[in-house]
Amino acid sequence: EASSPLCPFKLAEYLLIPVCDILTLGECRAEVNHLCNGGREEFSAITVLDGVRRTILHNGSHHPNRQRSNIAHEISHAIMGHPPAPLLNNKGGRSYDSEIEREANFLGAALLVSREATMKIVFDEIPLEIAAQEFEVSEKLMEFRLNITGARTIRRRSRKKS
């Protein structure tokens, strides 16, 4: 149902995109330990390409809601056909295309909370925190989707007509 929560892990499976938690990478123990502890905010998820085959690596030490968001973001890159980019730029910093990342952020959030879901949430008067819990997303992401879809405005206008 369009107004139900989507599981990004199941979507990845359906799309034949393996998802690998870096916590399972035994060969890189020191690096994984760093990324899951002190350097936790340094790594969320990345898509690794081998020809046309994609694999999503993600940080399983993050909160489950954050993991869902990270996976949805990476799936969005695949759905949108974003081209692979080098991990680092010529200065050794992270290679980052802000437009491509904005697109993946937008679609990732839309996958997790559909427009139909936002309409149901506002018309059923479900509190933000409860809606976020039901959809296993952050309150910030839920707030973004409620605003960007115009669900609250539509509800307000529909009440004025009544």
Image (cartoon, rainbow, N blue to C red):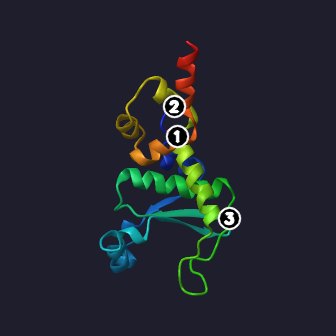
Vertical relation: 65 (above or below) 77: above
Residue found 39% across the figure and 50% down from its top: 65
Dot 1, crowdedness within 10 Å: few (<14), some or many (≥20)?
Answer: few
Dot 1 or dot 2: first in sequence order is: 1
Residue found 43% across the figure and 69% down from its top: 43
- Residue 32 as seen in the image, left or right of residue 92: left
What percent of the width, then of the height, locates residue 93?
53, 81
Foreground: disc 3 or disc 1: 1
Dot 3 or dot 1: first in sequence order is: 3
Name the residue that disc number 1 marks.
147
What percent of the width, then of the height, locates residue 133?
36, 39
Residue found 52% across the figure and 42% down from its top: 145
Q: Are marks 3 and 2 in contact (CB under 8 Å)?
A: no
Label 1 sits on what residue type? Asn
What percent of the width, then of the height, locates residue 67?
42, 55
Dot 3, crowdedness within 10 Å: few (<14), some or many (≥20)?
Answer: few
Q: How many marks?
A: 3
Residue found 41% across the figure and 72% down from its top: 42
Label 2: which secondary element: helix
Name the residue that disc number 2 marks.
152
Locate residue 96: give its quadrant: bottom right
Q: Are marks 1 and 2 in contact (CB under 8 Å)?
A: yes
Name the residue that disc number 3 marks.
52
Label 1: which secondary element: helix
Label 3 sits on what residue type? Val
Label 2 sits on what residue type? Arg
